[in-house]
């Protein structure tokens, strides 16, 4: 083949291969939905959802098999809406920086408090949580990258995988959930149907 022929062949090959390279690198919609399913399994787990409630009251335990209860001691989000509890009975009066060693003692992590009511996951569908996570009005103004980093680095989130005696940890790991969130975002952050 002369140089002209080689050039034509090379150009044709480039045109054929270049677009498919891009597609091979980005996860498909289906892979994105599969990644979201793993994220949902974590977010909807009681270790996370017990703090991500719509009303005033955190939930207790509710691990697989055990009945869920409203938090005792009349614990509430707090008059200032901060999530740190009512004046005189702050979350941190009982929840310290690390877990109680006693079964049924208060678990602990730095700055223990309830998630804002708009970040609700408790009893919300996979599609519903997916929409909330993508909505800057309801996710603390975060990009998807910032959501993934929050999951990997925040101590309250991290507590979900080391919840202390008698509590079932959230599935997987913080790092694994970070990676699933990245995969989901790279696929265009698809949400399941209601
Ligand atoms: C008077 C002490 C006390 C106060 C105040 C308190 N808690 Fe608790 N909390 C506990 C105890 C004790 C447990 C463990 C109960 C059990 O497992 O049977 C607990 C458990 C929890 C759990 C369950 C964790 C899980 O998923 O297993 C959450 C969530 C929680 N508290 C959130 C809060 C928040 C948020 C506040 C403040 C708004 C707060 N608590 C204030 C004593 C307290
Ligand atoms: C002790 C209560 C508590 C627990 C337990 C908890 N969170 Fe949160 N979460 C919060 C608070 C408070 C915020 C708000 C923080 C902010 O905006 O700076 C939050 C915010 C978030 C956000 C940011 C934005 C959004 O849209 O919700 C993510 C993501 C998140 N939590 C993931 C998790 C995961 C995953 C778990 C379980 C492995 C978990 N959280 C367990 C209290 C909790």
Image (cartoon, grey):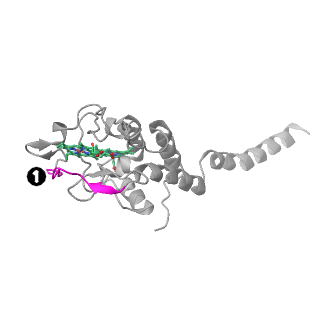
Residue at the image position 26 percent from the left and 33 percent from the top: 110
Q: Position of residue 151 (x, y in %)?
A: 39, 41
Which element type, helix, strand or loop, lies under badge 1?
loop
Q: Is residue 177 left or right of residue 68?
A: right
> Which sits in the foreground, 79 or 71?
71
Q: Is residue 77 left or right of residue 17?
A: left
User: Could one spot residue 110 in this view of the protein?
Assistant: yes
Residue behind mark 1? 79
State the image quarter where residue 67 is shown: bottom left
Q: Is residue 68 magenta?
A: yes
> Which sits in the foreground, 8 or 108?
108
Q: Is residue 172 left or right of residue 6?
A: left
Establish whether ligand 1 lies closer than 8 Å to the Cβ of label 1: no
Kindly give the residue lying farthest to the left in the view shown.
Answer: 88
> Which sits in the foreground, 47 or 30?
47
Q: Main secondary structure of the magenta part?
A: loop
In the picture, the quarter occupied by the N terminus is top right
User: Could one spot residue 120 in this view of the protein?
Assistant: no
Residue at the image position 74 percent from the left and 50 percent from the top: 16
Does 152 appear above or below 85?
Answer: above
Does 47 appear above or below 193?
Answer: above
Q: Position of residue 47 (x, y in %)?
A: 37, 46
Q: Position of residue 35 (x, y in %)?
A: 53, 50
Q: Is residue 7 left or right of residue 93?
A: right
Kindly give the residue lying farthest to the bottom in the view shown.
Answer: 194
Kindly give the residue lying farthest to the front in the view shown.
Answer: 103
Q: Position of residue 117 (x, y in %)?
A: 25, 55
| Label 1 environment density (alpha carbons within 10 Å; few <14, some 14–19, many ≥20) | few
Ligand 2 sits in quadrant: top left
Magenta segment:
67-81
Residue at the image position 40 percent from the left and 50 percent from the top: 63
């Amino acid at each position: 083949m002369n140089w002209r022929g080689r050039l034509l062949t090379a150009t044709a090959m480039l045109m054929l291969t270049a677009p498919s390279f891009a597609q091979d690198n980005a996860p498909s919609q289906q892979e994105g939905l599969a990644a979201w399913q793993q994220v949902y399994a974590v977010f909807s787990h009681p270790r996370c959802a017990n703090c991500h409630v719509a009303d005033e009251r955190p939930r207790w335990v509710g691990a697989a098999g055990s009945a869920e209860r409203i938090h005792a001691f009349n614990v509430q989000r707090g008059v200032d809406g901060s999530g740190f509890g009512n004046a005189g009975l702050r979350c941190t009066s009982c929840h310290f920086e690390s877990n109680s060693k006693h079964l049924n003692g208060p678990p602990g992590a730095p700055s223990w408090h309830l998630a804002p009511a708009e970040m609700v996951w408790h009893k919300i569908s996979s599609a519903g949580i997916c929409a909330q996570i993508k909505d800057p009005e309801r996710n603390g103004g975060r990009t998807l990258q910032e959501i993934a980093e929050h999951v990997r680095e925040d101590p309250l989130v991290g507590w979900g995988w080391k919840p202390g005696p008698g509590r079932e940890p959230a599935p997987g790991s913080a790092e694994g959930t970070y990676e699933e969130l990245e995969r989901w975002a790279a696929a265009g952050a698809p949400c399941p149907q209601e």
